Image (cartoon, helix red, strand yellow):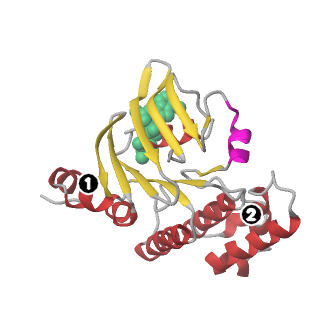
Amino acid sequence: MTALLEVEDLKVAYGKIEAVKGISFTVEEGQVVTLIGTNGAGKTTTLRTLSGLLKPLSGRISFNGQPLNGIPAHKIVAMGLAHSPEGRRIFPRLSIMENLQLGAFLRKDTAGIEKDLQRAYDLFPILGERRKQAAGTLSGGEQQMLAMGRALMSQPKLLMLDEPSMGLSPIMMQKIMSTIVELKSQGTTILLVEQNAQAALSLADQGHVMEVGSIVLSGTGQDLMTDESVRKAYLGED
Ligand code: ATP
């Protein structure tokens, strides 16, 4: 069986700066796969390239059996790859409901969209309670929920989450992480980028450690959590 996402020897550069230096990994259907690593490791660059927002220097990306190289971002969304970006990027003046509906802009099945709106409100009740309110009035954690909900509105085969725990209180972070577990149990495949290695590895089937543009270590979430070098570098242990 081929993987849902296959990345092979991917290189991405900003001018002369090579931010991703030939990485390879796969995401199987139904899995949660995480990329962890410190600031500047190239995690966000990888996700932005998979979404079609950046053009790779070289390498091969295949999604659901089709090559993604050279395909524009909106077509990639239509193929089933959704991205909840770092820093949330919600539309602050639009209502919460309008933000969610924008996630479904490529869909025409009104009844299905309505059902998925309800699903977003079930996952995150606060979004339902405040559906008519301007999204800019939400707290940081709530905006993160909205960004995730919006990405889900495109009915993705693969959901990419860039640092969903960034800047959140421990309680909010717990909520986001338990939502990821819930989405997985509903069959959503997830590629999760996180600086919070502990949280990400504890729920990931597979993890990859990135350092200055390369994957330096790969394994199951459990294996990486117990790996001594990972514990020292990323889990804050001596
Ligand atoms: P963070 O967690 O801080 O977002 P990251 O692992 O996601 O880190 P990237 O944002 O992918 O890392 O950055 C990888 C490298 O590329 C860094 O050295 C960064 O400074 C550089 N970089 C990122 N965006 C640009 C840009 N628009 N122009 C030039 N260099 C960039």
Q: Position of residue 222 (x, y in %)?
A: 28, 62
Q: Position of residue 225 (x, y in %)?
A: 25, 60
Q: Secondary structure at mark 2?
A: helix
The crowd level at tag 2 (other Cα within 10 Å; few <14, some 14-19, many 20+) is many
- In three-dimensional space, the C-alpha distance between marks 2 and 1, rounded to whole angstroms, equals 34 Å
Pick the residue in front: 61 or 47. 61
Residue 11, visible in the rendered structure:
yes
- Give the magenta-colored segment's residue range: 71-79
Question: Where does label 1 land, which residue?
Answer: 234
* Residue at image location 65% in from the left, 80% down from the top: 125
* Residue at image location 34% in from the left, 47% down from the top: 208
Amino acid type at circle 2 is: Leu
Relative to 44, is 35 on the left or the right?
A: left
Relative to 75, is 157 on the left or the right?
A: left
* Residue at image location 70% in from the left, 33% down from the top: 72
1 above or below 184?
above
156 above or below 120?
above
First-in-chain label (2 vs 1): 2
User: Which corner quadrant of the image does residue 145 belong to?
Assistant: bottom right
Residue 133, visible in the rendered structure:
no
Question: Where does label 2 land, which residue?
Answer: 100
Q: How many discs mark residues in the rendered view?
A: 2
Pick the residue in front: 68 or 200. 68
Q: Residue 75: within the magenta?
A: yes
Amino acid type at circle 1 is: Tyr
The crowd level at tag 1 (other Cα within 10 Å; few <14, some 14-19, many 20+) is some
Ligand 1 image position (quadrant)? top left
User: Which corner quadrant of the image does residue 23 belong to?
Assistant: top left
Q: Position of residue 236 (x, y in %)?
A: 21, 59
